[in-house]
Image (cartoon, rainbow, N blue to C red):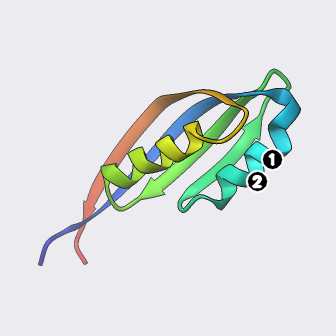
Amino acid sequence: MKPEELHVSSLIVHVNIKKVDSIQASINLLNGAEVITISPEGKAIVVLEAPNQKQIMDVIDNINEIDGVINTGLVYHEFEKQQA
């Protein structure tokens, strides 16, 4: 049986502070994404979990498409293989 993977990433997402509420809600609706905090300057810390790297990249692409998102930077990425 093929081992399953768990990918965990953290991001800093620079956002337009005037749209922070809608951006946070939109990110939290994405599968495996959670906004941890947003600074008064508009820097959001986001954690992602997914079964593979492609899904992590897809969520990052979706975040970048949200109105008011200025830039997304990957800070950390780790994965572990798990036996099913």
| Rendered position, 81 above or below 10 | below
Tell whether 22 sits left or right of 7.
right
Residue 23 x/y as whole percent: 74, 43
Among the 4 quarters of the image, the one containing residue 18? top right
The tag on residue 43 is none
In-front residue for pair 4/31: 31
Tell whether 82 sits left or right of 25.
left
Q: Quadrant of the N terminus?
A: bottom left
Q: In this figure, which residue is indicated by the disc labeled 2? A: 25
Q: Residues within 10 Å of mark 1 (few under 14, many from 20)?
A: few
The tag on residue 22 is 1
Residue 84 x/y as whole percent: 25, 78
Check disc 1 and give the amino acid type. Answer: Ser
| Rendered position, 17 above or below 67 | above
CA distance separating discs 2 and 1: 5 Å
Judged from the image, the secondary structure of the residue bearing numbered disc 2 is helix
View extreme (left): residue: 1
Q: Residue at x 64, y 52 (%)?
A: 34
Label pair 2/1, CB-CB below 8 angstroms: yes
In-front residue for pair 34/81: 34
Residue 52 x/y as whole percent: 31, 56
Tell whether 45 sits left or right of 32.
right
Q: Residue at x 82, y 38 (%)?
A: 20
Check disc 2 and give the amino acid type. Answer: Ala
Tell whether 39 sits left or right of 63.
right
Judged from the image, the secondary structure of the residue bearing numbered disc 1 is helix
Q: Give the total number of marks visible in the rendering.
A: 2
